[in-house]
Image (cartoon, coloured by chain):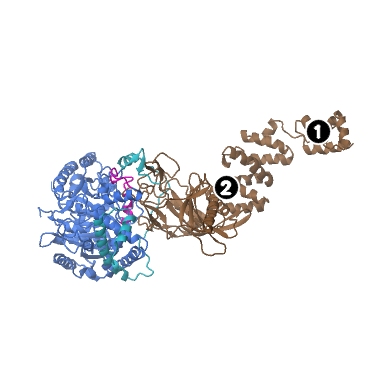
Amino acid sequence: MANQNWEAVIGLEIHAQLETESKIFSPDSAHFGGGDNEHVHPISLGMPGTLPIPNARAIEIGVKIGVALGCEINRRSIFARKNYFYPDLAKGYQISQFDEPLCRNGELAFFVGEQLHRVKIVRAHLEEDAGKSTHLGDATLINYNRAGVPLLEIVSGPDMRSAAEAAEYARMMRRVLRYLGACDGNLEEGSMRCDCNVSVRPRGQKELGTKVELKNLNSFRFIEKAIEYEIQRQIDTIETGGTISQETRLYDSTKNRTISMRSKEEAHDYRYFPDPDLLPVEVSQQQVSRLAGELPELPFARQRRLTEEYGLPFIDAHNLTEEIELADFFEEVARQSNNPRSAASWIMVELIRELNDSKKSISASPVSARHLAELVRLIDEGSISGKMAKTVFQEMWSSGSAPREIVQRQGLVQLTDEGAIGAIVDKIIGENAGQVAEYQSGKEKVFGFFVGQIMKATKGQANPEIVNRLLRERLKK
Amino acid sequence: MTIDRDTIEKIARLARLTLNGTEIAMYQQQLSRVVEAFTELAKVKTDAVEPMVTPLTESGLLRTDRVEEFSRMDEVVAGAPAVVGRLFKVPPVV
Amino acid sequence: MEFAELSTAVTAVRAKKISAAELAQEYLARARERGAEIGAFISLNDKAVDKARQIDHLIAKGQDPGPLAGACLGIKDLLCTDGLRTTAGSRMLEKFVPPYSATVVARLESAGAVTIGKTNLDEFAMGSSNEQSAFGPCRNPWDSTRVAGGSSGGSAAAVAAELVMAAIGTDTGGSIRQPAAFCGVVGVKPTYGRVSRYGIIAFASSLDQAGPMTKSVRDSALLLEVICGQDALDTTSSAQNVPRFVQQLKPQTRGLKVGLLKEYLSGGVDAAITKALERATAELRSRGAEIVEVSVPLTAMAVPIYYLVATSEASSNLSRYDGVRYGSRADFAEKPPEDLAEFYSRSRGQGFGPEVKRRIMLGTYALSSGYYDAYFRKACQVRRLLHDQFVAAFQSCDVILGPVTPTTAFKIGANIKDPLQMYLSDIFTTATNLAGLPGMSVPAGFDDQGLPVGLQVMAGHFQEQTMLNVGAALEEIFGQSGSPGRG
């Protein structure tokens, strides 16, 4: 925060819903949606006598995320029960991990602006999600479709100092999770949830201030705005003689402020203890090595490589590594066209705009990497002008056709024959003696008139550089 | 070692059990006696002893990630204390 | 139509000497009449005869009806039975009809067994006398003024009174062995992990095991073969191979080392029980067994460890009974709850009986902030030491022989007011659960009031066969206890 006297301290707890078919301890579907209590099973409903059986895939994805974040993987992690009563919690306890989490001591690197930041990952542990309550006026209704969906809770150190930094951390975490295919990172649907712990302290003070937990942040922009608001609120509170109480606050995006959750002041006593229904989760060194070997190049490393290998500007490399498929697409176009900068520009300016407008992902793009590379080559060869290329691109987007085909079909080939262009230049000069005289008397503005006439005569196909050169030469005479 | 009435009431709240005055007095007396009798455990030296959570030493079996939906939810809904459609109903909570 | 043992009845059914349907009708009638007198059952299975007819049908078609064809069983009402009310002896689950069966029940039924009814128990298996059932106590068939024991009292009484051929009980701290001893039947608690816990309403997850309660050791072996073995629905079920218990059953003890636990011989036990133990020791020695004294000093701590571990786990296991998805909810029509906490607390306060509430309170206390280390964690640490001492003891003996209980069946109401006294009566049974060891109760005659006496055989982890063989030897020595009224 831009405040000379105060420093903000921020840590994030990110809950990532793991991309499994079934739930973490039961075989009902883990997918979002479904009818009322459609994806439920006696196990996820906590019915008498039922027992949890861990989903091997959920554990594997958890390990994979841990490895990607450079964590130590616990060879024997322990599921524990977190005991509390709430209607969406079917068993009266949540199966989570406490003393012995799956992953510990990792790190996430990311940029804020062009500044490199590294944030410590304290721990990441597996747990089950709860159901969903819908509050009506006279009743609350419970849907357990989400109960038992596998989550990895990723806890950062209190290492961040600004709202922008926290938002970038969250954005980079989302990138990593999506690169791994571990979590779809959808904040709106809640498949990735960020809780932010925020406190402030006088600059130079070592001890942390009282922290407030912010919830209900379902976009990166809201994370940033909520933290900004909360930092200012805490500073204002303290400066006007108030104190910060340890509490959970919800972000209200319509009013851009945080509001205290009415909490009964009964201190939580979760009575964590190892779940006797579950044995330790064992992860072998071989499993860790195998998963490490299978990791894709991660977004941060890839961004750096794109800058170094292709000479891309920082921001281009950053944007092109948003998704693994986008980065793959770029590299394919760059390789086939042999013009990375132009490839980057076409993707970021034209392609991403179209994709965003039509809400398509890069993998659903009607313009293939091969076709886009061909388009770049056509420009570089001088076969078409940049302006023509935009027309061709529009046609590629709507028809999915190859650019060479479109160029031929529409007769868009650029006129580069100096003899032919020269003949037209001469003809136009001959027909407009008045303007020639004006130009020669020093009114250079008339030059544009000649260019326009020549382009009109060639239906815009004349190579503009040749037109300019020849026109200049011949008007001098 | 006796457990005071406040502690009994606190524990009852934590365990979500409504107890009447007689019950509170009874449990206070009985649990105090039980806990008193159990203090002998403290005499056993357990430095560096790993707590035993389960007698099993094997690694537990895991499940393959495959969906198998439960087909008899209607029966569960029919047996529930209060529902609206297929949703479980509780008093309003905010 | 009298069968002393389940094994002989099954043989007769398989040989078409008698129909399973006839047997089911007969046992159902006994359960309905005599069962009601002693309070052995909570629910009877009105589909029992239909199920038996299917067995007969299979036999008529020449198909294999399974190793338990026509066996009429009582199932402790803690095991879920698909379509048949399962109450756990609690008002909380008074109307609960599960849409699934416990793995144990499913295995028994697919082996041809017929469930006659759901037997009475202490609420959620919490008790040592069956007086804590919300459906009334189960009386001892040998003396109806006395308890049947608990928590599997209904199962023990039903077997003793021959209302079923055999029954399934569960044992968390002695709940199979103690009522078996009180009622003069065989009761086996297998090694932890031998039998799937899926569908068995949990009391204490790290201690609970289901097992057979039968007239003979052979019958127990037969049922064990069916119910033991790993289950994909219980991650704490063991992958250990299940022996052919029946085939290898032999009452041979030559060369066997029988341990006597020093700590279990220090008095405080009824004379009749001590005498039975002495007789057993002498007879086993004369049959070639070597008698050795072993020591597990921490058995003295078994009751405190047990009550801290079991109640802690139970306090969490029973949190799911909140009146939201199934089970009973308090009537809020007259006085709606002020908040969510009251909504839970009233349903739970009304739905649970006094002993269950007492144990939830104790367990919640032992796990709560500030007490966890001193109680729960400490108990788990001493539990490991106790476990290790048992493992060491079994280095110098094959089985341990001892009492099951300090007394024979006590009077109804005698211990009800003093929970601590009741807890202390579990002195000889809780240690096996804590260590995860198998243990069994074998009938060993009667005391001078005509009440059954039982002896306990314990063995090392997964050594049920050795234990059953010693049980068979004791059965030869003492004979089966028969049935009250028939002798």
Question: Which stretch is magenta?
Answer: C314-337
* Left or right, residue B31 beside residue C158: right
Q: CA distance from mark 2 to mark 1?
A: 48 Å
In this view, the residue in front, B14 or A278, is B14
Give above or below for C396 relative to C317: below
* Picture quadrant where residue B13 is located: bottom left
Badge 1: residue crowd in 10 Å (few <14, some 14–19, many ≥20): few
Q: Is residue C311 visible?
A: no
Front-most of residues A77 and C487: A77
Discs 2 and 1 carry the same chain letter:
yes
B2 with respect to A212 (left or right): left
Chain letter tied to blue: C
Horizontal side of C336 relative to A357 (left or right) equals: left
- Judge whether residue C92 can be spotted in this image: yes
Quick one: quadrant of the N terminus of chain A? bottom right
Which color has been applied to chain B in this rendered view?
cyan
Q: Is residue C212 magenta?
A: no
Which chain does the brown colour mark? A
Foreground label between 2 and 1: 1
Residue C337 position within the rendered picture, expressed as x and y whole percent measured from the top left: 32, 47
Q: Locate the C terminus of chain A and report the quarter of the image it occupies.
A: top right
The amino acid type found where label 1 is placed reads: Phe
Q: Which mark is residue A474?
A: none
Q: Which residue is mark 1?
A: A449
Residue holding disc 2? A324
